[in-house]
Image (cartoon, rainbow, N blue to C red):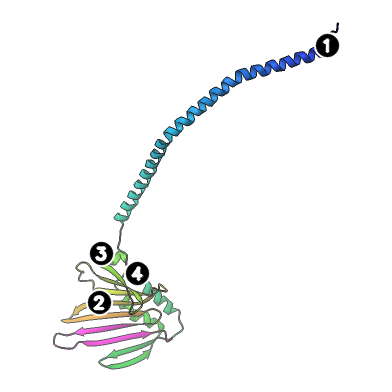
Amino acid sequence: MVYPNKQSTINLSFTRFILNDYFLTVYFQRPLLRTLQRFFLFVVLRMQKLFPFILIGFSFFLNSCHSNKTRVEHSENDSSEVASIFPVTEFLKGQLKMIDGMQTTPLKILISNGKTDSMWLKREDVRTDATPFLQPEIDSITMSPFFSETSFLDQTINAFTFSYYPKVRLPDSLHLTHWDVYINPQSREVQRIYLVKETDENNNHITTQLTWVTDGWYSIRTITQSPDKNEPDVKEEKMIWSFD
C-alpha cells in the first residue's frame, strides 16, 4: 500500500483551491456581466430613441441664439444708419497736402472774355485759391440728410460715376447743388471730382463749376447771368501743378 507523501497532498490541495476559486469566480461573475451588459444595452437603446429629440432641441437653441443676435445687430444698424457719401473734402485736403511737399512751381491760367493770361505762383497759392472746393464740408454726416447717391459705369469715359443730387429742399445757406466723383474701374482710384454751386448776388445768378483732376490740376469756372444781358459772363481759373 502506497501512501501519498506530504508534497503530493499540498499540490492536490492547491489544485482543488484553484479550481474552487475559478468555479466561484465564473459562477458569480457571469450573472453580474450579463446584468451589466443588459444595463448598458438598455441605456444605448434609450439614447437612440432620445437622440433625435435632443438634436432637434439643440438645433432650436442654436437658431434662437442666432436669431436674437441677428435682430440685435439689425436694430443697431437701423438706429445708426447713415447714407454713404464719398468724403470729397478729406480727399482734396490730402491732395493739397501732397502739393505742399512738391518742388514744382504751379502755373495759373486765367481765361476771361476770350482772353487768356498765365502766371507762375507759389505753392501756398494753390491752397488759397482752392478754398471754394473745401466749403462746405462734403462727407456722410454733413451731406447725407440732404443728398442721395446714384452710381453707374460710364463706358464712354471708362469710369465709375457717383453722382449726388438733392433729395430734400436745400437750406438757403447751402449753395452746393450737385457733385460727381469719377473712379477708375481698374485701379479703383479717384480720377476727377466735379462740383456745382448756385448763388444769387445783386440780381445776378452765379453758377460755379469746380473741377479737380487728381494729381494734375483744378479749375474754377464762374458763369454769371445778369438780368440785363442775354449772354452770361464766363471766367475760368485753372491751376496746374503737374506737367507730365
- The secondary structure type at the circle numbered 1 is helix
Distance between the Cα atoms at labels 1 and 4? 111 Å
Q: Residue furthest bottom?
A: 115
Residue 174 drawn at (x, y percent)? 23, 71
Q: Kindly report the distance in space between the C-alpha atoms of the residues bearing marks 2 and 1.
A: 128 Å
| Residue 70 located left or right of residue 171 | right
Residue drawn at x 30%, y 74% is 180
Q: Nearer the viewer, mark 1 or mark 4?
A: 1
Per the image, the residue denoted by label 1 is: 6
SS at mark 2 in the image:
strand
Asked if 148 appears above or below 115 in the picture, the reply is above
**Label 3: which residue?**
145
Relative to residue 5, is residue 165 drawn left or right? left
> What residue range appears in magenta?
219-240
Q: Amino acid at mark 1?
A: Lys
* Sequence-first tag of 3 and 1: 1
Mark 3 or 1, which is nearer the eye?
1
Q: Are marks 1 and 4 in contact (CB under 8 Å)?
A: no
Please give the label number shown on residue 80: none
- Calculate the distance from the C-alpha at mark 4 to the C-alpha at mark 2: 17 Å
Residue at the spot 25% in from the left edge and 77% down from the top edge: 197
Q: Nearer the viewer, residue 242 or 48?
A: 48
Which of the two discs, 1 and 4, labels the residue nearer the N terminus? 1
Picture layout, residue 66 above or below residue 188: above
Which label belongs to residue 197?
2
| Label 2 vs 3, first from the N-terminus | 3
Query: Judging from the image, what secondary structure is the residue with disc 3 in?
Result: loop
Q: Residues within 10 Å of mark 3 (few under 14, many from 20)?
A: some
CA–CA distance in space, label 2 to label 3: 18 Å
Q: How far, Cα to Cα, is label 3 from label 1? A: 114 Å
The residue carrying pointer 1 sits among few (fewer than 14), some (14 to 19) or many (20 or more) residues within 10 Å by Cα, namely few
Badges 4 and 2: C-beta atoms under 8 Å apart? no
